[in-house]
Amino acid sequence: MGKSFAIFMAGIGVGVAVTAWVNNDGELQNRLKKAAREAGNDLQESEIWRRGKQAASGAKDRLKDNLSDAIDGAAATSKDLAHQAGEQLEGTGKRLQDA
């Protein structure tokens, strides 16, 4: 339904534009505008639209997970660095006491 539907909608759009350009009938132009609006609404309710929304939602969730993992990794790294610094200070303190 994806490519054929898009081609169909493009054909309708070209047909509407040419008909509105050739005809100066106000009622016909209003009917064409209404048909174009309805076609746009149908597109928003289509499978393509739904898949696009799902893809965007999935990307957003993956980004949140990656940020969470990065924050957790940074917290663990800073904890390890603080522990190592503490051990070095303790070792230096013992050497000073022995001296």
Image (tube, rainbow, N blue to C red):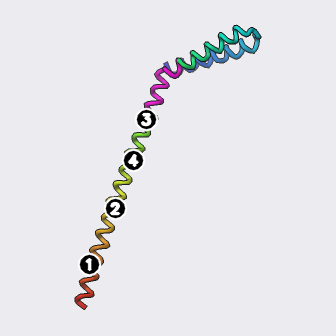
Q: Which of marks 4 and 3 is nearer the N terminus?
A: 3
Point out the image quarter for the C terminus: bottom left
Does residue 8 show up? no
Give the spatial CA distance, label 1 vs label 2.
Answer: 20 Å
Q: How crowded is mark 2: few (under 14 residues within 10 Å), some or many (20 or more)?
A: few
Which secondary structure type mostly characterizes the magenta part of the structure?
helix
Q: Which of marks 1 and 3 is nearer the N terminus?
A: 3
Kind of residue sitting beneath label 4: Asn
* Contact, mark 4 vs mark 3 (Cβ under 8 Å): no
Which residue has dot 1 on it? 90
Which residue has dot 3 on it? 57
Which residue has dot 4 on it? 66
Residue 88 in which image quadrant: bottom left
Which residue has dot 2 on it? 77
* Residue 8 coordinates in the image, percent (x, y): 58, 16
Q: In this picture, which residue range is highlighted in magenta?
A: 42-54
* Contact, mark 1 vs mark 4 (Cβ under 8 Å): no
